[in-house]
Image (cartoon, grey):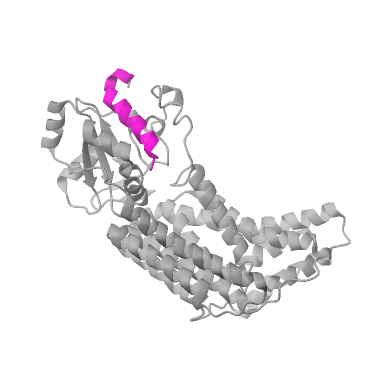
Amino acid sequence: MAVKLGYTKVYRYPTGYPEWHAKGLPVDSAPAGLAGMVSEPKGAGPLHGWAMIWTLVGIFVGGIALNLTPCIYPLIPITVSYFGGRSGLRQGKLLIHGACYVGGLSLTNSVLGIVAALTGALMGAILQNPVVLSVVAAILVFFATSLFGFWELRLPSGLIQAASKPYAGYFGTLFMGLTLGVVAAPCIGPFVLGLLAWVASMGSPWLGFIIFFTLSLGLSLPLFFLAIFSGQIEKLPRSGEWMLWVRKLMGWVLVGMATYFIRPILPKSLGVFLFAVVAISAGLHLGWIDRTRPPFKAFQWIRRVVGIVGLVMAFIVIGSWLIRGPGVSWQAYSDELLLEARRLKKPVIIDFYADWCSPCLKLDKVTFHDPETVKQAGQDFVMIKVNLTRGGNPVYERLLREYGIKGVPTIVFLDNQGKELPALRLVDFVQPNEFLMRMAMAKKGPDTGL
């Protein structure tokens, strides 16, 4: 993703690509100990491993929850009736119709995700600008007010009627899935906008496809199962005020996403406080303040659980911030500091970062506050941080050229002679155990065969 650092344009590596992979060298040329750790490149973007799995689970659940918004819920009996009219078909043909339905909806949203990601790759520099981040957050809050009922987002009636028009055959089922997003736009539009902005900021078409495909599955699979078993459905919960509560829940999700975008440009303590305030406000509003009348017994319990979850999240965020130990002690870059490190025969770690860089903030929060990492850094390394948040520093401009920095975060490891160990370079967030492994190899220096 292109990122402009004020005075020069740089480019981020795809997530997880070590230096030798970025140069097109074979994986087996990586030094011993690292080949297994990065034997295959990870997917682009900040999500991989368990973070990716849990994120997709959350998006899938969000897609399911969108079925309970006022714009989607009325489509359930329409969908059931549509498939119910094909109940005389053999089970195989009915399943094909269902697959066409799910495929149509998934195709529409997945293409939307890819376009957002490709656009983000072209406007990555813009999305890192504090002014633009503030505007995106403001837009998300603006659309959240629609979900809270302060104003209504409505589409032209002619467009809705065209999208709702029935068509026969497999193409009709496919078209129904393709156009469901149009009919549902007044409710899911603001929510999808938040995902679009997030996907665009990552600049990964692959992640854009996966994220929106997962959202589409969550949105369409419940309707798919209702359609397949439409003959066995006797009663659905009646529509009513409880659907407005679900809509308000989606509104708080948008407010949370706005907080995500605005946090990088705020002081760390203020960012934590803001997130906690949003979580507490959402919990209190959804769990107790909102006066939606419960249409069925389970609804009251659902409200209380959601409210408690919001309060617990705020407690965890504030608690983790207060109890976390000291972080790595960084020094500002200077040529004299490098000369002193060579005199002391200490390896050096240089962290190129920016305040608006989300992986940089995660490195600081997790990896650079790990007790063992802090201990090793204080005893055996000279730790240097180069702040690229603002441009105009000629020394930093020289460092970008000298070390070939292509984006942030980039962490450079130098041996005790001041020479870089390029295979150890990092261009994304890593867990403390992986960072400690690289620190151990940096202490051994050229003896590792680098």
Q: Which quadrant of the rendered structure holds the C terminus? A: top left
Indicate the position of residue 281 as horizontal and vertical percent values.
43, 71
Residue at 73% in and 56% down: 100
Specify whether 154 is left or right of 285: right
Q: How many marks?
A: 0
Q: Characterize the magenta stretch by its predominant secondary structure.
A: helix
Q: Is residue 81 magenta?
A: no
Q: Nearer the viewer, residue 86 or 256?
A: 256
Residue at 69% in and 71% down: 75
The answer to whether residue 266 of the structure is visible from this angle is: no
- Which of the 4 image quadrants contains residue 82? bottom right
Indicate the position of residue 413 as horizontal and vertical percent values.
27, 32
Indicate the position of residue 119 as horizontal and vertical percent values.
45, 56
Q: Is residue 371 above or below residue 146?
A: above
Residue at 44% in and 64% down: 256
Q: In this view, does 39 lie above or below 287?
A: above
Indicate the position of residue 6 as horizontal and vertical percent values.
24, 53
Q: Seen from this angle, which residue lies furthest left?
A: 336
For the magenta stretch, what is the residue range? 429-449
Specify whether 118 is left or right of 384: right
- Which of the 4 image quadrants contains residue 333? top left
Q: Nearer the viewer, residue 30 or 245?
A: 245
Specify whether 250 is left or right of 180: left
Specify whether 2 is left or right of 384: right
The answer to whether residue 128 of the structure is visible from this angle is: yes
Residue at 38% in and 29% down: 20
Q: In this view, does 4 lie above or below 307?
A: above
